[in-house]
Image (spheres, helix red, strand yellow):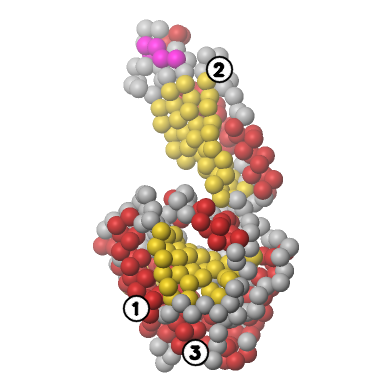
Amino acid sequence: MENATQHIRDIDIKSGYRDYFLNILQKLVETETPPADPASHKALFSILEKELEGLGYEVSMYNGVKSGGQLFAKPKAQKTGCYQLLLGHIDTVWPTDTLQKMPFRNEDNTLTGPGVYDMKAGVAMMLTALKVIYDHDDVEPVVTPILFLNSDEESGSVESASRIKLLARAMNRVLVLEPSLDPDGKIKTRRKGVGHFDVTIKGVSSHAGIEPEKGRSAILELSYLIQKLHQLNDPENGISVNVGTIDGGISTNVVAPESRASVDVRVRTKADAKRLTNEITAMESDTEGVTLEIKGGFRRPPLVQNKRNRALWQAAKEVGDQLGLELTEGTSGGGSDGSYTSLFAATLDGLGAVGDGAHSPTERVFLNETLQRIPLIVNLLLLPPLNEQG
């Protein structure tokens, strides 16, 4: 462990790894991967496949339906039956041609471009860490590093979640290279669970001027329901409920026969996820003659601080201390695939880029601070098996 740390303590210009990281990151950012665009996803996967094969990895691709599928990679020279997973995604929230307005730039220790922070820098960090290990014949992971990248994380990992869960069952630990939390780079040791609910309300139409009393407005009923939903917000306990979109009605001169809404719910605990699911789906109409249907549930469970996750966090803290990095932890309101793996294996999230502005035009990565995290990833990959499975 100490020898490995000495080998890769500094990722600087002289080592060549800084340039490697920047070159691969520029390729990834300049290959745009908008939501639900399989062709663009496959183009980027092709870049990664070639790079991974050069690092001694065997790559398998799994086809998607609305996405470009998933990439799975394992070392060709596999010497151990104990595994660890490097997990991430290559899709972004940005539409095609965003690159024209947000080009890849490297200026004053700041990297910009669509998806540079969430999470193409994290993918470049994976490759750089694997290259460091590949280049050093005197260090070899006792726990075999496996890599899995999907292209539908930003849309809920609908096509990939089952495969992620299956992989996690076979892993000793999982390192998620989603971006760190806040500009100071906190590691994400907790994440909120993410729920989605679709509301459909059916009323009775009538002429708004001639016989309004014969109608039952689905829009009016939706206004009552929205207030009920927002009353469920409990910031002190980490519960947020947001009616994000609404729709309904036919015309201004018709009492609305139907209305719809989509609802986002975030919670810290499994108990709250279960309770809120029951409360929301059990809501009823306040107006006679109006029907209410609510479907949905929690797509991603919370990432919680169980014993095995805490053991991995403590191991990371110790590695950070050896490298002169003072790691801190935090809770994210956003979801990630780490919440799936946490159900089955020790998981540490937010090990990726240091920066801020995810999903916004101010998205950016702090180069030097992010490079400092690559030795952390390398040395986590070189740790012995994690024994705490509580």
Crowd class of label 1 (few under 14; some 14 to 19; many from 20; radius 10 Å): few
Check contact, mark 2 vs mark 3: CB within 8 A: no
Q: CA distance from mark 2 to mark 3?
A: 71 Å
- Which of the numbered marks, if any, corresponds to residue 311? none
Magenta stretch encompasses residue 34? no
The image quadrant that residue 110 belongs to is bottom left
- Which of the numbered marks, if any, corresponds to residue 23? 1
Give above or below for 51 relative to 230. below
Part of the protein shown in magenta: 204-208
- Left or right of 60 in this view: 186: right
At x 57%, y 44%, the residue is 298
At x 52%, y 58%, the residue is 164
Magenta stretch encompasses residue 205? yes
Q: CA distance from mark 1 to mark 3?
A: 21 Å
Q: Which residue is mark 3?
A: 136
- Left or right of 112 in this view: 202: right
Q: Which residue is mark 2?
A: 287
Comparing labels 1 and 3, the label whose residue is closer to the camera: 3
Q: Earlier in the sequence, mark 1 or mark 3?
A: 1
Q: Is residue 164 among what the camera can see?
A: yes
At x 41%, y 83%, the residue is 18
Give above or below for 194 relative to 355. above
Q: Is residue 366 among what the camera can see?
A: no
Comparing labels 2 and 3, the label whose residue is closer to the camera: 3
